[in-house]
Amino acid sequence: MEDDWSAVGRAISNRLDERGMTMTELAKQAEVSLTTVRELVHVLNTRRRHPRTLGKLSKVLGWPEGHLQQVLRTGEVESDPVSEEPGELAAIRRELQELRRRVDALESKSS
């Protein structure tokens, strides 16, 4: 099976949305270039990436280190693979994301 860069892009993009995170924040926290993140999300350059790059991105996104490598190989995006965050922190993060979504919805209604 060929590497599925589109699946990697979808996985990263969806996770950024879930976490209310920007590509810039991801790049900074993972210590990779913003260009690399953009290329992955928008599938602009499918050159071979170092596994360490995908590992760093996976960890910052709260996934096990090998998650994006697995997505690349299989094309399958698990909705919620086992996270490396403690359960309570993950629950707080989800609640914060939901609150952000609600605030955004209220702000767009009042505009």
Image: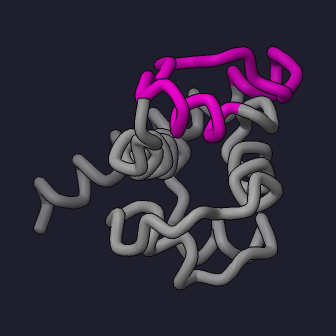
Give percent across and percent down for residue 43.
Answer: 35, 63
Q: Nearer the viewer, residue 56 or 43?
A: 43
* Badge count: 0
Q: Is residue 84 magenta?
A: yes
- Image quadrant in which you'd find residue 69: top right
Give percent across and percent down for residue 94.
Answer: 58, 29
**Does residue 100 appear in the picture of this structure?**
no
Position of 7 compared to 65: left or right? left
- Image quadrant in which you'd find residue 64: top right
Position of 89 compared to 11: left or right? right
User: At 41% from the left edge and 73% from the top edge, which residue is drawn?
Assistant: 45
Q: Nearer the viewer, residue 69 or 17?
A: 69
- The correct choice, above or below, for 68 with respect to 91 in the image is below
- The correct choice, above or below, for 49 with respect to 55 in the image is below
User: At 70% from the left edge and 44% from the top edge, which residue is drawn?
Assistant: 58
User: At 73% from the left edge and 15% from the top edge, which residue is drawn?
Assistant: 82
**Which residue in the rendered view is the most extreme toward the front?**
1
Give percent across and percent down for residue 46.
Answer: 44, 65
Color scheme of the displayed model: one colour
User: At 54% from the left edge and 70% from the top edge, which residue is drawn?
Assistant: 37
Q: Is residue 80 magenta?
A: yes
Work out which quarter of the rendered image holds the C terminus and state it: bottom left
- The correct choice, above or below, for 4 with respect to 47 in the image is above
Work out which quarter of the rendered image holds the N terminus and state it: top left
Span highlighted in magenta in the image: 67-91
Q: Nearer the viewer, residue 41 or 18?
A: 41
Position of 108 compared to 64: left or right? left
**Does residue 94 appear in the picture of this structure?**
yes
Give percent across and percent down for residue 32.
Answer: 73, 75
- Image quadrant in which you'd find residue 86: top right
